Amino acid sequence: MERLQWTVKSFNQLTGKEVYEIMKARVDVFVVEQECLYHEVDPYDLVSLHVFTTDEDGVITAYARIFEIDDGMSFGRVLVRKDCRGKGLASLLVAKVLRVIKKRFAGMPIAIEAQEYVQSLYLPFGFEPASEIFMLDGIPHIRMEKR
């Protein structure tokens, strides 16, 4: 995989095209592909750091958002575009997200609500299951924590 260019921006720093590409990628994966009807756009978008990489046309290939929660930091909406999967991009994305958190929010505990079927993505990064499986928007999730 060629050297990726990662972008990290607050909502107010995003261009209109970037907002469009982010929302399109998230709807493509979480609403259409996973057949999950819920409010994809939410208030966390306004207070998150948005981490992504694109192809040469500016189309999102991998994305996640980072935000504060009551007891530390979290990240979510982790996605890799369907035609870019199976190349290690999800692990590169999680590694980038964790570097951003370490740099900007050093020492803060991290908790995520991972879809159950991809919890193995987070284990090599030191995340451990911290709850029973629960349903969120019709999809099994598990809380995972990294201390």
Image (cartoon, rainbow, N blue to C red):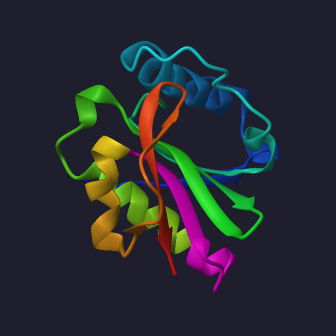
56 over 110 or under it: above or below: above
71 over 42 or under it: above or below: below
Residue ranking furthest to the left: 86
Residue 2 pos. (x, y %): 24, 53
Residue 141 occupies quadrant: top left
Residue 145 pos. (x, y %): 49, 69
Residue ranking furthest to the bottom: 107
Instruction: Confirm whether the magenta stretch covers residue 112.
Output: yes
Which residue sits at x=35%, y=31%? Answer: 81
Please state which of residues 60 and 39 is positioned toward the viewer in this rendering: 39
Please state which of residues 35 and 49 is positioned toward the viewer in this rendering: 35
Residue 27 pos. (x, y %): 52, 20
Magenta region, residue range: 101-115
Residue 127 pos. (x, y %): 40, 70
Please state which of residues 128 and 24 is positioned toward the viewer in this rendering: 128
Residue 80 occupies quadrant: top left
Left or right, residue 146 beside residue 48: left
Can residue 92 be spotted in the picture? Answer: yes
Which residue sits at x=73%, y=40%? Answer: 45
40 over 64 or under it: above or below: above
Please state which of residues 28 and 123 is positioned toward the viewer in this rendering: 123
Can residue 3 be spotted in the picture? Answer: no
